[in-house]
Image (tube, rainbow, N blue to C red):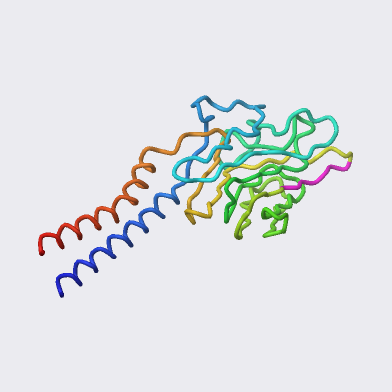
Amino acid sequence: MKRNNKLLTLFFIACLAGFAHANDAAAEDIGFETYPNGSPVPGGAEITDEYASPLPPLLAGVTFDSICTEGATQVTYVMDNVTTSSSPNSLGPCGPAPYIGDTLILNFDPPVIEMSASIVDDEYPVVVSAYDAGDSLVDQSQSDGVRSTIDQITVSGSGIKRVEMVGGYKPLGNPDGWGIDDLVFSTESWGPAAVEASTFGVTDVSSSNRLNTLAALLLPLAAVFVWRGVRRKKR
């Protein structure tokens, strides 16, 4: 009986270690420097659904849309000539210049529990609002509107399906040409699982991240088989 208790204790410790390791692997940031096919993202590129497919391990996908002033010809615009939190690229709504700015919309599938991003090159505050699938406001934040600073903005809450980022306008009516960088979002299923769009290119999830996650899932299973094997021998 005591031996069985010891085995059960070891089993639960192994399970806890596996889950803790899974969270560690999921929390690993993923740098986005190329498209999914490995090619680099050039300045001036338009980003819409390139990140729509969830990336392994079990991460949400995101698509980009925008609300633009008259004259814009792109949904989004990759800026490679401004100060960013991780060079060379940042992503602005609409475009090209002087129409970069206005409203950037991020749609997540599946929903996420947190999203953060660096707001760059903003001269007026950018208001960031998170909504659930029923269009109810979940959380809201905003940048400081100081061009010389890079603001880290975070919104969080259960079931975030859409995030809208609304920028300001210059005195003559053109939108303030702001952008985002270092996009990170956490999925419902993994908790701190994160995807980072650090330079608005994309790289596959690293092989080490895949192996860490696989190991985290297999560790509790291995403990179960070891436990059952010991029990069979005792019989």
* Boundaries of the magenta span: 165-171
**Res 91 → quadrant:** top right
Q: Which residue is farthest bottom?
A: 2
Quarter of the picture containing the C terminus is: bottom left
Q: Residue furthest front?
A: 235
Against 177, is 130 above or below? Answer: below
Residue drawn at point x = 57 percent, y = 48 percent = 110
What residue appears at the point 50 percent right and 48 percent down from the top-left corner? 194
Q: Quadrant of the image for the N terminus?
A: bottom left
Horizontally, residue 38 falls left or right of residue 218, namely right
Q: Is residue 205 above or below residue 213?
A: above
**Res 181 → quadrant:** top right
Q: Nearer the viewer, residue 68 or 86?
A: 68
Residue displayed at 72% across by 33% down: 75
Q: Quadrant of residue 66?
A: top right
- Which percent across, then down, holds residue 40? 54, 26
Please tell me which residue is depicted at 59% across the width and 32% down the height of the picture.
50
Furthest-right residue in this view:
172
Residues 88 and 17: in front is 17
Q: Main secondary structure of the magenta part?
A: loop
Magenta segment includes 234: no
The magenta stretch spans residue 168:
yes
At which x and y percent is residue 197?
Answer: 55, 40
Does 91 sit left or right of 94 as displayed? left
Residue 179 image point, x, y percent: 68, 40
Q: Is residue 205 left or right of residue 159?
A: left
